[in-house]
Amino acid sequence: MKIWYVGAYGIVSTTAMLGGKLIEKNKIEQTGLVTSLPQFDGMDKYAPLKFEFNGHEIRKVENAYQACLQHWEQNRHFEREQLEEVRKELESIKAEKGTAINCGEGVRALGELSILEDELETLGEIVEKLEKDLKKFSDGNTVMINSASTEPLINYSEKYHGSLDGFERMIEDDVKEHASASILYAYVALKNRIPYGNFTPSPGSDIPALKELAEHKKVPHAGNDGKTGETLVKTTLAPMFAYRNMKVVGWMSYNILGDLDGLVLSYKENRESKVISKDKVLEKIYGYAPFSITQIEYFPSLVDNKTAFDFIHFEGFLGRKMKFYFIWDAIDAIVAAPLTIDIARFLLFAKKKGLYGVIKELGFFFKSPMGTDNVNTHSQFEELVRWYQENS
Ligand SMILES: NC(=O)c1ccc[n+]([C@@H]2O[C@H](COP(=O)([O-])OP(=O)(O)OC[C@H]3O[C@@H](n4cnc5c(N)ncnc54)[C@H](O)[C@@H]3O)[C@@H](O)[C@H]2O)c1
């Protein structure tokens, strides 16, 4: 299968490329891949573990090997020899230049960027170039995954985002203030019948215009924002209090992380989308909103090690208040990378089974699942298994 990563040189994308190639060569086990569970038997028929990777990127790096090595130098997140085993394969992955339109100050802080806006003037020209790159790479087994840095909230306009006609008018009339990189990438994917998975809280395909396009082109898509760490634990644990009819009165989540993702999220406008995505889950599980604090702070020396401290204040029998604390300490790319492969495989499966539009059953993978309010990890997993087994 072929995966086109938006943000191809990021730590999540390059870790997925590395792991994917090592799995293909039978050099590592499939630990961490949900699609390798016995419940998803037969997945290989639709999306074999043989990969071609590429994507769009905006930072100047020579190839995916160099990008992966740079991340390794900071993080030591795998054994160095593992990278050498697939050096040639990763060196041959040279990403195409992407767009950073309205990606905010956080993305500009990534350093000197190499972007299409430097050489192309209009949205129409940018979209045309993105489409050309994707078409050169893609075939019927291709999926696009957005794993680029988080964008600020979109400047939503019913006129331009509310319908496909409006969206195409925005491109034609070059209305830049209502465009953003993630919606342009998603547009190009869906228009070319390439399934699209949004691993980030950026809007991606989650606007009415692009949902309409996915329906019209009969192509599956899913998002938003990979559920990999603190929110995964939260949405697994939170139902327990509900099952026992205990009342959660307060939940504090304090996240610290470094690396490029942390740097981008240290900018208020970029962080805003992430906080909303993490914050909404409790209300969806309980039907009421406990007092909550959700904070994400940049902590450079941690690099890709994300640490989350959670404090839960809950009330039981006789109105007694009690406390629960947990600490999640994980390597972000290690928990995220396999999921991008899983999402791509499920989306390819959906396409091959003629399923299209928002695939809400993939909500298991996301913090803000599209098309459903179910954020309970337990029932999401059951739903995913049922969906796969009924359709395979
Ligand atoms: N556990 C996790 O790591 C996790 C969980 C959920 C969501 N995410 C999201 O996944 C994304 C990737 O995370 P990461 O840790 O790999 O970050 P990263 O900073 O290492 O990678 C992002 C890459 O995207 C590139 N990029 C930024 N804007 C772009 C654009 N407009 N077009 C093309 N490329 C662009 C950057 O240059 C960078 O190489 C982030 O948005 C993050 O919030 C990560």
Image (cartoon, grey):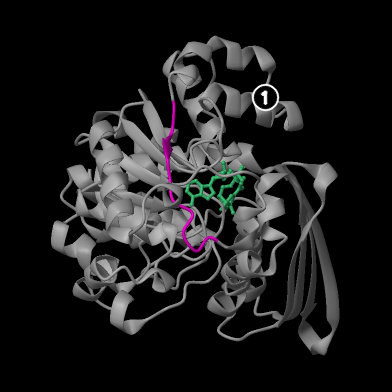
Q: Where does residue 159 sit, x and y in percent of width and height?
A: 29, 82
Instruction: Return the residue nearer the eye: 161 or 46.
Output: 161
Disc 1 residue type (three-letter): Phe
Q: Is the CB–ligand 1 distance for label 1 below 8 Å?
A: no
Say which residue label 1 marks: 78
Residue 15 vs 300, above or below: the answer is above
Give the prevailing secondary structure in the magenta stretch: loop
Q: In which quadrant is the N terminus drawn?
A: top left
Residue 84 vs 31, above or below: the answer is above
Residue 291 vs 38, above or below: the answer is below
Tell me if residue 278 is in the magenta stretch.
no
Toward which corner of the image does residue 239 lie, by quadrant?
A: bottom right
Q: Is residue 83 left or right of residue 184?
A: right
Instruction: Return the residue nearer the eye: 74 or 312.
Output: 74
Residue 16 vs 105, above or below: the answer is above
Count residues near mark 1 (Cα–Cα under 10 Å), then give few for <14, some for 14-19, many for 20+. Answer: few
Q: Where does residue 136 sit, x and y in percent of width and height?
A: 24, 33
**Is residue 223 in view?**
no
Span shown in magenta: 94-103
Q: Where does residue 230 sit, x and y in percent of width and height?
A: 68, 57
Q: Is residue 384 left or right of residue 187?
A: right
